[in-house]
């Protein structure tokens, strides 16, 4: 992959927080082989603008204001299957990492680890490899060969899972609707579906389940 006849990795940043985007750009500005080719603050803008930017790697926030990052990831990979996407998250790595990797992400890292790991991660996924932290790699490795039934929350869609974690974090249906730019009715439907799938009666039981299974910190 080259840019202007030099070995340069073109990066596109999709994150709704301007201060985060600026922080990432400052880290990358110190690298001679990496340039920021574009940025977006919503999932819709990311889908629209990434084609014009022609990046080799996309840094994609998993919690965008207009749509779930994994939904954006799936659309991006459908339109540009060759693009390496590195997911960024504020969540504990094992909460969303497996879902993101299954959806086509080339890597997954927390924003807290970005200052130390970002450049290495970008170079690795740009080279066609996968990237996860050492801690996450250990977690994934420990699950290989384990003989146990899949937990109930594995049956949830990405949006249902996101709703679960937000309710368990203390957010009301109205709060979630506002945060995700959805109607209260839509969020209520997600809540109802996930309760049925998980055989739970109410939000209190859902919260206890999430805490017991370490889905929220």
Image (tube, rainbow, N blue to C red):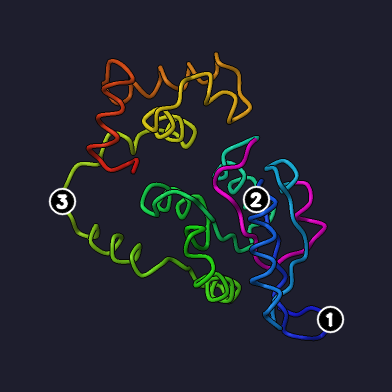
For mark 3, what is the residue? 147
Question: Dot 2: within a 10 Å radius of its alpha carbon, few (fewer than 14), some, or many (20 or more) residues?
Answer: many
The magenta span reads 48-65
Quadrant assignment, res 195: top left
Is 50 part of what is drawn in magenta? yes
Q: Is 93 positioned to the left or the right of 185 in the image?
A: left
**Alpha carbon distance from label 2 to label 3:** 38 Å
Q: Please name the residue shown 46% across and 55% down the image.
A: 101
Q: Please name the residue shown 42% across and 21% down the image.
A: 191
Residue 130 location (% of width, % of height): 48, 68
**Farthest bottom residue in view:** 6
Residue 132 location (% of width, % of height): 43, 66
Is 94 placed above or below 24 here? above
For mark 1, what is the residue? 4
Q: Please name the residue shown 32% across and 35% down the image.
A: 153
Q: Is 214 positioned to the left or the right of 67 in the image?
A: left
Mark linked to residue 15 = 2
Q: Please name the residue shown 18% across and 55% down the image.
A: 146
Along the polypeptide, which appears first: circle 2 or circle 3? 2
Residue 162 location (% of width, % of height): 46, 35
Quadrant assignment, res 83: bottom right
């Amino acid at each position: 992959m080259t840019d202007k006849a030099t070995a340069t990795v073109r990066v596109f940043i999709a994150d709704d927080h301007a201060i985060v985007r600026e922080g990432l750009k400052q880290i990358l500005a110190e690298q001679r082989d990496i340039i920021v080719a574009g940025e977006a603050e919503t999932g819709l803008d990311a889908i629209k603008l990434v084609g014009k930017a022609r990046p080799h790697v996309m840094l994609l926030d998993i919690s965008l204001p207009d749509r779930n990052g994994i939904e954006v990831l799936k659309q991006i990979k459908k339109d540009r299957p060759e693009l390496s996407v590195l997911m960024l998250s504020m969540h504990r790595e094992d909460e969303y990492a497996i879902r993101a990797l299954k959806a086509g992400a080339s890597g997954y890292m927390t924003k807290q680890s970005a200052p130390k790991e970002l450049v290495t991660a970008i170079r690795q996924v740009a080279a066609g490899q996968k990237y996860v932290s050492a801690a996450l790699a250990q977690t994934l490795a420990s699950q290989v060969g384990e003989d146990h039934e899949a937990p109930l929350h594995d049956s949830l869609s990405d949006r249902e899972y996101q709703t679960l974690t937000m309710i368990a974090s203390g957010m009301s249906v109205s709060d979630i609707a506002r945060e995700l730019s959805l109607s209260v009715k839509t969020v209520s439907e997600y809540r109802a579906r996930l309760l049925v799938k998980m055989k739970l009666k109410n939000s209190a039981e859902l919260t206890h389940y999430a805490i017991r299974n370490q889905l929220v910190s």
